[in-house]
Image: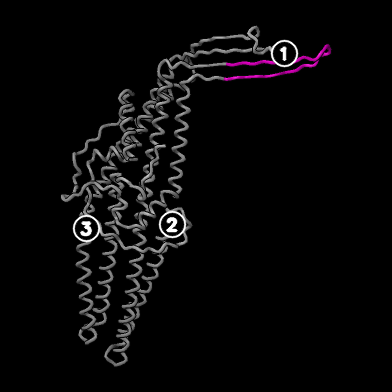
Amino acid sequence: MLRRSLLISASLVVAACAGTPNLAIAPGIEAPADFQAEPQVELPAAGDWVASFEDATLSALVAQALSANPTIEAASASLDAARASARAAGSNRLPSTDASASTSSSDTSSRPSEQYSFGLDVAWQVDVWGRLSDQARAGYLTAEAARADLYGARLSIAGATAKAWFSLIEAKEQAELARRDVDTRSRQLEIVERRFARGVARSSDVRTARSALASSQASLAAQIRIEAASGRALEVLLGRYPGNQIVPDSTLPILPVLPQPGSPQQLLERRPDVIAAETRLASAGYSASAARKALYPGLSLGAGISSQSSDASDLFDPDFLVETISASLLAPIFQGGALRAERTRTEAVARQLSARYVETALTALREAENAIYADRTLEERVEALIVAQREAAAALDLVERQYASGVATIFELIDAQSRLITAESQLIRARLERATNRVDLHLAVAGDFAAGGGYADTSN
């Protein structure tokens, strides 16, 4: 529903641009009907993309991050500030009313005296050329862009949390693999030492096995450090103290078939950063129009009622009231070129934002194409590494038996174990890359949220 709200906002922006200067209209982006890297097998578009990973802990972590992350709080405050600025800009089109009251006393040689005065003034700047309306529209659109920024921040934090969680799981699995490697190296060292004691192995074999064990222990220490750092990174996203207190109880997800990513045009219509860029461009167009109209004459109307008396009870007596009505026409003649310079500046800003809109849209399309393409290639990589890991395990089992019988050398044994560890480590890493790429895909196409998985209405 929040995405629908963003779509409505985008539609309002497009509708508003229909009557705006050309500087406010976003350039057209040539995009095909479908993504060029679109997979052949597709499912219907996913709803709650966080829940699609089937990890209850992940859903809970994302919900916590969305409620506690300071980046989201900052974006929410920016939205409140932008909305207040928009209200202030819109208020200039309405009349302003000021009331005043005063009292004074004097003490002369003859006698003391009191004076009371009251005044009520109403002023209205007539929006003859629509300059004030342009400023109000610019403020409103800036607030709409801030709202898109807030949604984008929520989407980004949800994605960062998911990727941090997967990285922590991967670090845990890599540490567990390193521990198994240390255990295997220790067992192999025991075998070598027994063979050396029987005189069937050389002392160099013992030293080689000890060296391999020490290297594995060093790798384990490095993996433990990486696991702790990954835990702290996740805790910061959750708004917690980075004390490395999160213990992952999940495994890397087994991903379903890639969901239907939609079309490039749909991406441009719902990506928060693209919507924000287009909305800011429209706002800049109105600001440029207002700066141009500031060179035209302005009309101001005023009315007032005032009263002054030495007796406070007479202040509102009709005989003491003075009514005034005024109208003034003000035309700028010379201000040192400030108004023309402002017009030039706002037009340049609009052109700059037009170029940035194109850049933002093309970047969004590139991210989607890359993520779609990578999903298939990463799946192929995972499948190949599964075969590599299985064959390496079988080879190690064979070499261990051969070494025990004196057929294989210590170097062949160490090499077989290293190949297995490398294959298993690469498999774990590839599964992480595929999971994080799937998150990147949902971020690229601005995937929907659902309750508990990153959804929250920010329209209020």
The stretch drawn in magenta includes residue 99: yes
The kind of residue tagged 3 is: Glu
**Residue under label 1:** 311
**Res. 311 image quadrant:** top right
Lower position in the chain sequence, tag 2 or tag 1: 2
Magenta span dominant secondary structure: strand
Residue 6 in the image: above or below residue 89: below
In this picture, which residue range is highlighted in magenta?
Answer: 98-120
Lower position in the chain sequence, tag 1 or tag 3: 1
State how far apart marks 3 and 2 are (Cα). Answer: 30 Å
The kind of residue tagged 2 is: Glu
Query: Is label 1 in a helix, a strand or a loop?
Result: loop
The kind of residue tagged 1 is: Asp
Query: Depth check: 243 or 346 in front?
Result: 243
**Residue under label 3:** 379
Residue 234 is tagged as: none
Lower position in the chain sequence, tag 3 or tag 2: 2
Q: Which residue sits at x=32%, y=85%?
A: 190
* In this picture, residue 236 sits left or right of residue 357: right
Q: Looking at the image, which residue sits at the far left?
A: 40
